Amino acid sequence: MTIELYANEVVTKAGDAQYLVTDNQVKGKLILTNQRMYFKTSTEKQTKFNLEIEPEEIRELLYFKTKMFFPNGLSVVTKNGKELNFTVKNRDSWSLMINKMC
């Protein structure tokens, strides 16, 4: 699984994640660089769920629990009102790194 990086772009954090889309859980990798955030699916059949999020598109980050008690949900709310929900390990670390990027 690779992504094309811009000039001077460096991966700062990457890890397994699930993108929660209306009753679907799309498995993949969440990748954070010094310039952007990506979600890349783990299978070629689901490439329509690949995402690229620019820092200026992010309005806020919210936490949520999955299955009522697992504290692993991270919601990225964009300025156009779209809410992108992910499950990740160490969501505090992800949130801190995303805030540094913005």
Image: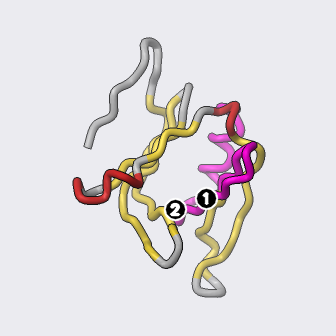
Image quarter of residue 63: bottom right
Residue 78 shown in magenta: yes
Residue at figure coordinates x 28%, y 37% from the top left: 2
Q: List the residue tagged with mark 1.
A: 91
Amino acid under disc 1: Arg
Q: Nearer the viewer, residue 71 or 5?
A: 5
Q: Nearer the viewer, residue 23 or 40?
A: 23
Q: Which mark is residue 88?
A: 2
Location of the C terminus by quadrant is top right
Image quarter of residue 71: bottom right
Q: Position of residue 70 (x, y in %)?
A: 60, 79
Q: Callout 2: few (<14), some (14-19), or many (20+) C-alpha neighbours within 10 Å?
A: many
Callout 2 secondary element: strand
Callout 1 secondary element: helix
Q: Nearer the viewer, residue 46 or 74?
A: 46
Amino acid under disc 2: Val
Residues in magenta, as a range: 76-102
Residue 63 shown in magenta: no
Residue at figure coordinates x 32%, y 51% from the top left: 47
